[in-house]
């Protein structure tokens, strides 16, 4: 007998500091009875409240631990990981400590760690996201779980290592697990099932793999932000026989960013009607190692092929860094970049619509800016080496905005 309920068209909800919320036609609605049953309040607070100094989430003596594990992204945490960390912090009670395990180098200071909601930070810089070491990472996660005995473990359900790591641990430890979680609170998780035809709900499992955009990462509180010196010896793990020689990292095969589908690109430079020298723009993209996009106007003018068009009638992109050169920002274009983490606009018009969406707006001539950036990027490549410069180009742009 199929006990899965049919999908409620009002779902899924996003968990925020106010409880489970949903957005309908631009209005924020509360879950109502479901929220009341889960003990989550839905009081509305003004924007002014959000801007005030945030208090510590808890100062009580911890009796239990929630562990959040994820890979670092060029020394920082990507948006999906921030959402996962926020989920753990939002559903934790006053006696629960949030421990963040970062696989890879994490350059944020204690204040940033606290602002994201973590009480303790464990950094394992030996695990680079660009390397493939699934067995060593599994051993490290297992050792951390053994040391802190968390009640629940949270990981982003992505295709860049975290989702795989969570599934590996659940299988190895025979732990209860929920994947592609689109709704979560202190008592339950929910996910779509049967090709999105049904909606499955269960009690909070030991391992939670959270889908993107299920949680609002803006927190009304901060964590303790304490860095913990915790050491994991990869060589000892291998010597003890827990590592497997069957897994061999063949490295990363680098390709021309121009060959990458825009939907998969992490760093995009996009041209609008304000770009007159297309050849110079393409040289900049090649120097930065960025994929090329374009506005509908630039495509209609024949400057770029239709597959480069970004917007409602083109491609929807999710880049970490999106630089728009000479793009005014029509609503159709803004719809195509709504999921980009950081948007940089270069435009002579400070009142252009894209300036309202951009995290950083450069009021300057587009062609002069392209020439200056090309020169600076070429100098960086010569000084640091081609591979390092291409990897760091997006990180430098992102670092200016974090």
Image: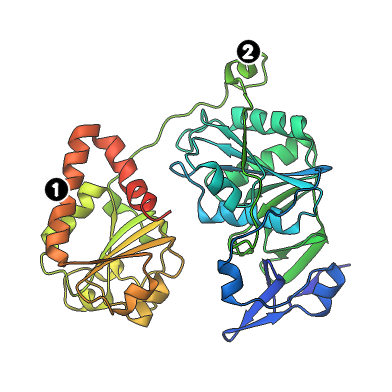
Left or right: 368 in relation to 67: left
Which label is found at residue 239?
2
Residue 207 shows in this picture = yes
Q: Nearer the viewer, residue 364 or 156?
A: 364
Instruction: Kindly report which numbered mark, 2 or 1, lies closer to the viewer in this rendering.
Output: 1
The quarter in which the N terminus is drawn is: bottom right
Q: Is residue 282 above or below residue 130?
A: below
Query: Is residue 9 in view from this perspective?
Result: no
Front residue of 142/19: it is: 19
Above or below, 239 relative to 130: above
Q: Secondary structure at mark 2?
A: helix
Residue 62 in the image: x percent, y percent? 80, 43
Q: Residue at x 71, y 28 (%)?
A: 143
Display colour scheme: rainbow
Which circle marks residue 167 in the picture? Answer: none
Residue lying farthest to the top in this orientation: 239
Q: Is residue 310 above or below residue 260?
A: below
Q: Position of residue 19 (x, y in %)?
A: 73, 69
Quadrant location of residue 264?
A: bottom left
The total of numbered circles placed on residues is 2
Which residue does the image show at 74% across and 70% down from the upper left? Answer: 198
Q: Is residue 325 above or below residue 140?
A: below
Task: Decide: few, some or many residues near mark 2? Use Cα within 10 Å; few <14, some 14-19, many ≥20.
Answer: few
Frontmost residue, 109 versus 391: 109
Which comes before the other along the chain, label 2 or label 1?
A: 2
The residue under the point 22% across, 54% down is 285
Q: Return the residue at label 1.
A: 375
Residue 375 image position (x, y, % from top left): 14, 48
Instruction: Specify few, some or many for label 1: CA neighbours under 10 Å numbering under 14, 14-19, or 20 or more.
Output: few
Q: Is residue 221 left or right of residue 188?
A: left
């Amino acid at each position: 007998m199929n006990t899965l309920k049919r999908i409620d068209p009002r779902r899924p909800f996003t968990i925020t500091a106010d409880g489970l919320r949903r957005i309908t036609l631009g209005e924020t609605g509360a879950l109502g009875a479901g929220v009341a049953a889960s003990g989550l309040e839905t009081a509305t607070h003004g924007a002014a409240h959000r801007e005030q100094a945030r208090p510590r989430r808890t100062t009580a003596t911890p009796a239990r631990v929630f562990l959040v594990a994820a890979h670092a992204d060029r020394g920082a945490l990507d948006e999906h990981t921030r959402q996962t960390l926020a989920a753990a912090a939002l559903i934790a009670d006053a006696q629960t400590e949030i421990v963040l395990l970062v696989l890879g180098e994490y350059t944020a200071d204690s204040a940033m760690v606290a602002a994201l909601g973590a009480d303790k930070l464990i950094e394992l810089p030996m695990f680079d996201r660009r390397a493939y070491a699934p067995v060593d990472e599994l051993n490290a996660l297992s050792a951390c779980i053994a040391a802190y005995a968390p009640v629940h473990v949270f990981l982003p359900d992505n295709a860049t290592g975290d989702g795989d790591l969570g599934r590996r641990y659940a299988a190895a430890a025979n732990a209860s697990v929920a994947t592609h979680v689109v709704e979560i609170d202190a008592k339950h998780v929910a996910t779509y099932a049967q090709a999105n035809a049904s909606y499955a709900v269960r009690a909070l499992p030991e391992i939670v793999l959270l889908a993107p955009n299920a949680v609002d990462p803006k927190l009304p509180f901060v964590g303790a932000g304490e860095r913990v010196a915790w050491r994991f010896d990869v060589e000892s793990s291998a010597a003890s026989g827990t590592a497997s020689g069957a897994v061999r990292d063949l490295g990363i095969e680098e390709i021309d960013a121009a060959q990458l589908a825009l939907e998969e690109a992490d760093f995009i430079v996009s041209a609008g009607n304000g770009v007159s020298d297309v050849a110079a723009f393409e040289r900049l993209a090649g120097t930065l190692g960025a994929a090329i996009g374009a506005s509908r106007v630039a495509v209609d003018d024949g400057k770029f092929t239709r597959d480069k068009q970004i917007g409602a009638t083109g491609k929807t992109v999710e880049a970490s860094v999106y630089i728009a050169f000479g793009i005014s920002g029509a609503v159709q274009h803004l719809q195509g970049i709504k999921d980009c983490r950081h948007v940089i606009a270069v435009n002579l018009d400070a009142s252009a619509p894209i300036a309202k969406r951009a995290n950083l707006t450069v009021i300057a001539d587009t062609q002069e800016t392209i020439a200056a950036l090309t020169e600076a990027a070429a100098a960086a490549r010569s000084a640091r080496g081609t591979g390092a410069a291409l990897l760091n180009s997006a990180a430098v742009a992102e670092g200016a905005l974090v």
